[in-house]
Image (tube, grey):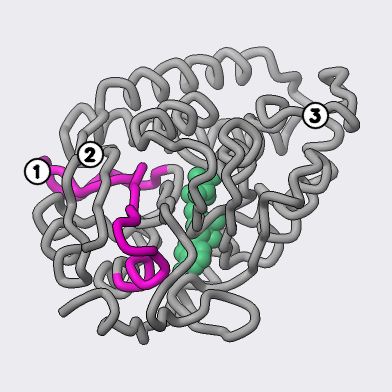
Amino acid sequence: MTAEQTTPKTTTDRTLAKALVAHWAARADLDFIQRDLERRGKDRARLTVADLANHDQLHAGQLTATRDFAAWVGVHDPLRVLDLGAGLGGAARLLAAEHGCPVVAVELSAPLHDCGAELTRWLNLGHLVEHRCADLLTDTSGVGLQAHEDRSDFDLVWLQHVDMHVPDKGALYARAASQLAQGGRVVWHDWLAGPGGSPHYPVVWSDGGELSFLTTPEALRADAQRTGLTVGRLEVITERTHGWFSRTHGGLRRALEKLPDTAVRRRKRYTSLALRMENVLRNLDERRLLPFYGEAILG
Ligand SMILES: C[S@@+](CC[C@H](N)C(=O)[O-])C[C@H]1O[C@@H](n2cnc3c(N)ncnc32)[C@H](O)[C@@H]1O
């Protein structure tokens, strides 16, 4: 079957969609971001992508990882990028600001989408980054993605920490392939199931596994192949991911020790995050999770 013949029909289950929106809702907090910028003496009129990176890069490695991944992918001006599951659009803005790429950022959660669109206005990147609120698997004409006909507009589909949230990999890859120009690429910075068994939960993206749908390298290759995508490079990046989680976890523990007794909400949030990070580290040590970069070419 070629990519042209593949029409994804599956939409994300409503219960799953609601749970995903709830899980990430706290990250859509413009007031919190604004206050943090003020505290750090950042001028709203002169913001850079780096100034927002603690808030808008919702993946392992944050800004460093996005830059590293962009270098691995070989992003160059003016690749047309479709960022699926864009969150707050941190990567979309980086690709626009640092590589001049026009990016369409598709996000399921309305609060994340709205917050991300506002951050794009703060950085004056509206001419390059377009935000759309849609289920990446659903063809909601005029709002989300259009079904592929005989050509498409994108050179790159960017999947950063979103594959793990999508149960139907065939539908995801078919959707991604359907948006690509011939010779275009789908690229992943995501998580795979490792040989060590099921992960320990909670992790950062899921409390008990209900939002986590991990595929194996072999299944990824086979599912992608069925949609006309050929997976070439696939690199497991355990060491650098482990390093980032170790450092970040250490920083979080030190911050926890310094918190005053009155900071009850922050203590709760940091404690929960620290536990999730400890589980990720254990999962990496036991090869239950494989963080990876991947690339597939259409045609
Ligand atoms: C871990 S966050 C990563 C966000 C962003 N890619 C980043 O790296 O900063 C995963 C995002 O994928 C979004 N997502 C999950 N399933 C989706 C779907 N079916 N359609 C659109 N977005 C989806 C979630 O709402 C969430 O914002």
What's the residue type where badge 3 is placed?
Leu
Question: Disc 1 on helix, strand or loop?
Answer: loop
Q: Amino acid at mark 2?
A: Leu
Disc 1 marks which amino acid?
Pro
Q: Nearer the viewer, residue 250 or 87?
A: 87
Residue 229 vs residue 162: left or right? left
297 in the magenta segment: no
Comparing labels 1 and 2, the label whose residue is closer to the camera = 2
Left or right: residue 78 compared with residue 276: right
Residue receiving disc 2: 290
x and y percent of residue 138 in the render?
48, 80
Q: Mark 1 to mark 2: distance in Å?
A: 9 Å
Please indicate, yes or no, whether residue 32 appears anywhere in the rendered image.
Answer: no
Is residue 42 found left or right of 58 in the rendered image? Answer: right
- Residue annotated with mark 1: 195
Q: Which residue appears at 43% of the width and 75% of the height?
A: 137
Instruction: Please state the extent of the stretch shown in magenta in the rendering.
Output: 174-203
Q: Residue at x 45, y 82 (%)?
A: 147
In this rendered view, identify the residue nearer to me: 170 or 276: 170
CA gap, disc 3 and disc 1: 43 Å
Answer above or below: position of 6 versus 45.
below
- Mark 2 secondary-structure assignment: strand
Q: Position of residue 251 (x, y in %)?
A: 54, 16
User: Is 177 contained in the magenta span?
Assistant: yes
Of mark 3 and mark 1, the one earlier in the sequence is 3
Residue that label 3 marks: 47
